Image (spheres, grey):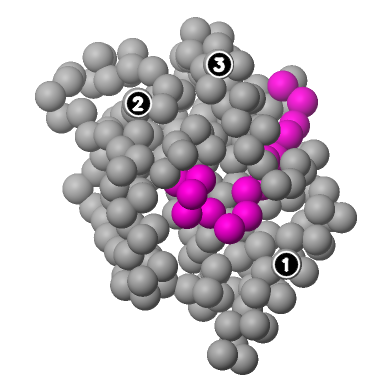
Amino acid sequence: IIGIAGGTGSGKTTLTEKLRDHFGANEVSVLNHDSYYKRHDELPYEERCKLNYDHPDSFDTPLMVAHLRELRAGHPVQVPVYDYTIHNRSDKTVTVQPAPVIIVEGILIFDSSELCDLMDMKVFVDTDADVRILRRIVRDVKERGRSLDSVINQYLTTVKPMHEQFVEPTRKYADIVVLEGGHNLVALDLIMQRIAGHIAENSDT
């Protein structure tokens, strides 16, 4: 189980996708912490917009821990699907199959000691804050239907302070700190070698 953490827009997803593409879906399964945002049916849309989505309490981390244990035991799990356009969990789920390597990705995964205890390797992706905010603006406006004003407001009121309070301090738990995420080919190669060794070991047993 490999944890890939880091701030918003740091390049976690790029790194995760390159690893999965390299080894294939049969060898690598991925769990995104974002899928485990808590459901808030009790709140109207306007109130859900105001929630702090960058605080550890906004995630149903115990469910993710339970799913990781199931995957490690060789059982498939039904992962929630989060709908960013309505700021709530949808009614859909996605089946994630067990695999030799499971990547856990998210900004706050190292904040949970329970999650960390399940990880065999912890990677923190570190990218300049200016680059991260620009990537987030492009992503949220293009892919998540947000307005530029709402993205900037969210960044300044919750994303940035939560990054400094919760995300950045978890860097110390990482086994490897990768600068520039999936674009750091040297770090990518080192991680790939470690994964390849693990897959080879397990295929021999």
- Tell me where residue 68 sits by quadrant: bottom left
Image-based side of 3 in relation to 128, left or right? left
**Residue 186 location, x and y as percent?**
87, 55
**Residue 50 location, x and y as percent?**
33, 13
The earlier-in-sequence mark between 2 and 1 is 2
Indicate which disc residue 131 carries: none
Front position in the image: 97 or 141: 97
Indicate which disc residue 194 carries: 1
Label 2 environment density (alpha carbons within 10 Å; few <14, some 14–19, many ≥20): few
18 in the magenta segment:
no
Front position in the image: 120 or 137: 120
The residue at 67%/83% (across/down) is: 200
Q: Are marks 1 and 3 in contact (CB under 8 Å)?
A: no
125 in the magenta segment:
yes
**Residue 31 location, x and y as percent?**
45, 54
Quarter in which the C terminus is drawn: bottom right
Which element type, helix, strand or loop, lies under badge 3? helix
Q: Which residue does the numbered mark 2 point to in the structure image?
A: 57
Question: What's the distance in space between the residues labelled 2 and 3, CA to CA?
Answer: 13 Å
Which element type, helix, strand or loop, lies under badge 2? helix
Q: Which residues are magenta?
A: 115-129
The earlier-in-sequence mark between 1 and 3 is 3
The vertical placement of 2 against 49, above or below, is: below
Amino acid type assigned to the residue bearing label 1 in the image: Arg
